[in-house]
Image (spheres, rainbow, N blue to C red):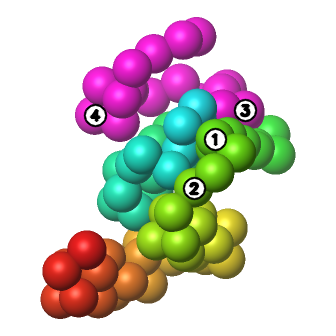
Amino acid sequence: MVSTTVIEVGVNVPNASVMVIESAEKFGLSQLHQLRGRVGRGAEKSFCILLTGYKISNDARERLKIMVATNDGFKIAEKTWKYVVRGI
């Protein structure tokens, strides 16, 4: 399946086990978390691969590190809030 970010709203494909997100540095934490949640709904092990350009900003790098470090939506929301407070 190939999709735009519209997939983050209500699409349920339980057997989907791999997702590749191109230009992941262009998405916010909440969007990446929602997209990642579309895979791994079945019994199979799942993977979400985040592809980026060669040069990315420090802020984008930090967001991607957070995505790799946790699957906890509450922790991601907390980090998102810190970005909002900092004005990013």
First reached walking from the N terminus: tag 3 or tag 4: 4
First reached walking from the N terminus: tag 3 or tag 1: 3
Quadrant for the C terminus in the image: bottom left
For disc 2, the neighbor class at 10 Å (few under 14, some 14 to 19, many from 20) is few
Q: Name the amino acid type tagged 4.
A: Val
Residue 76 in percent (x, y) is at 42, 76
Q: Quadrant of residue 53?
A: top right
Looking at the rendering, the stretch of residues picked out in magenta corresponds to: 1-20
Residue behind mark 2: 56
Spatial CA distance of label 1 from label 2 is: 6 Å
Q: Secondary structure at mark 2?
A: loop
Q: Quadrant of residue 40?
A: top right
**54 lies above or below 13:** below
Q: Secondary structure at mark 4?
A: loop
Residue 47 in percent (x, y) is at 75, 44
Residue drawn at 58 percent across, 32 percent down = 22
| Label 1 close to label 2 by CB (< 8 Å) | yes
Q: Nearer the viewer, residue 18 or 68?
A: 68
First reached walking from the N terminus: tag 3 or tag 2: 3
For disc 3, the neighbor class at 10 Å (few under 14, some 14 to 19, many from 20) is some
Residue behind mark 3: 18
Residue 70's disc number: none
Q: Nearer the viewer, residue 40 or 57?
A: 57
Q: Is residue 72 left or right of residue 86?
A: right
Residue behind mark 1: 53
Residue behind mark 4: 9
Q: Name the amino acid type tagged 3.
A: Val
